[in-house]
Image (cartoon, grey):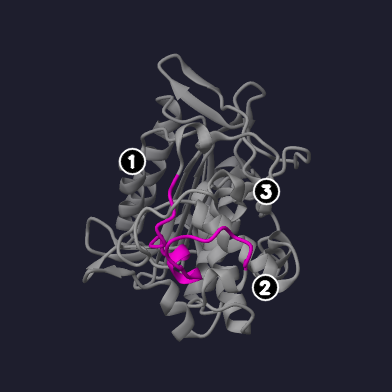
Amino acid sequence: MKPIRKFLKNFLSARRLLGDSTRLKGLARADAILASLVSDKKIPGLAITVLKRGEVLLQKGYGCADLEKKVPVDPDNTLFRVGSVSKPIAATALAKMVGEGTISLDASYYDHVPDYPPKKYDFTIRQLAGHTSGLRGYRGKEYGLSKPYSIREGIAIFKDDPLLYPPGTDYLYNSYGWVLISLAMQEASGISFEEYVRTSVLHPLGMLNTQPETPDAIPRHLATFYSKNQMGFKKAIPVDNFYKLAGGGYLSTSGDIAKLGQAYLDKKIADEPLISQFLSSVYISGQPTWYGLGWQVSEDNQGRRYFGHVGNGVGVYANFYVYPEEQQVFSIMINCTNPDVQSELDEVIDSLISLGSANRHY
């Protein structure tokens, strides 16, 4: 009788948690879509954490963190590369530093890094953070470099190239701007960028699993990273992302990244006027770029406002979205270079976006 009693207890608990059949269908639909991504061999593994009003609505792992060893994904512990979801982490640290008065968004970059090679035009921290500085993006194989550069050493990749346009006149998304920002933050604070982020953002927010990826120190629970071709999954090429830590070099869990989104909903980061600068779209010639300062700021296909970031890099694809009006946070991590499943992830988000609050794992 014990298994039957346990089943009934779980069933009644689920009904109490979900409240009505609509919510149950929403969770079941999301679960089915995510499970099918693994069973259809579209992804090796995935972790998802969804919060509603600060409580867990859905948290689950799908597939494998390591296919060969058959290690299952654990959303609390499996460490993924987060790609450009690193930018909101770095932007949060930048906001803290601006709030302290240590660095200014509108100061010339050369005020903080005077030895950076001079360009035809001056540019600011704000322009770097909003991708309007004129700095170029990746060329050729730069996307997958595997050289042990420090942040300062990494600027050698692009520091001698001219700006592509006068700052403030156009928009070009890139990660190199955040390499420069992290260098300026080091110079302004007198401590390493990673230490400032750790002490000002990660530890205060309880993001204790979030850390830089360093090839010489492999943490426990690190996922194996894959790429995909017609033959299936293969291990991704080795990369060293440390020099671009601020733009795409962090490791984290889906649960930790969700904590970052919730901290913004709870207004725990900085004063609202300052945060609004980071979470408001930059405009060029009267048109929005749909990007703030380190944050994508947009609307989904149903017209619902969100801020967040997509992460797409070697061995990673991630979605991190915060819906302020719905008070929901979505954190999805996949251990594979772009597996072309964004439409399925959009369906998952759409099926969960209107569900009520919850307080336990599904």
Q: Earlier in the sequence, mark 2 or mark 3?
A: 3
Task: Pick the quarter of the image with the N terminus.
Answer: top right
Q: Residues within 10 Å of mark 1 (few under 14, many from 20)?
A: some
Label 3: element kind: helix
Nearer the observer, 140 or 218 = 140
Q: Nearer the viewer, mark 2 or mark 1?
A: 2
Identify the residue shown where x is 27% and y is 58%. 300
Q: Earlier in the sequence, mark 3 or mark 1?
A: 3
Task: Kindly identify the amino acid type of the residue bearing the numbered disc 3.
Answer: Glu
Tag 3 near tag 1, CB within 8 Å = no
Question: Which residue is under mark 1?
Answer: 344
Residue farthest to the right? 217
Task: Kindly identify the amino acid type of the residue bearing the numbered disc 2.
Answer: Ala
85 above or below 204?
A: above
87 above or below 238?
A: below
In the displayed structure, does residue 297 sit left or right of residue 205? Answer: left
Label 2: element kind: helix
Residue bounds of the magenta highlight: 113-137
Q: Does residue 251 show up?
A: no
Question: Which residue is under mark 2?
Answer: 188
Question: Which residue is under mark 3?
Answer: 153
In the displayed structure, does residue 189 sit left or right of residue 143? Answer: right
Query: Where does residue 315 sit, x and y in percent of width and height?
Result: 54, 35
Label 1: element kind: helix
Q: Is residue 41 magenta?
A: no
Nearer the observer, 245 or 120 = 120
Query: Where does residue 48 sit, x and y in percent of width and height?
Result: 50, 48
Q: Does residue 164 show up?
A: yes
Query: Where does residue 34 sit, x and y in percent of width and height?
Result: 42, 39
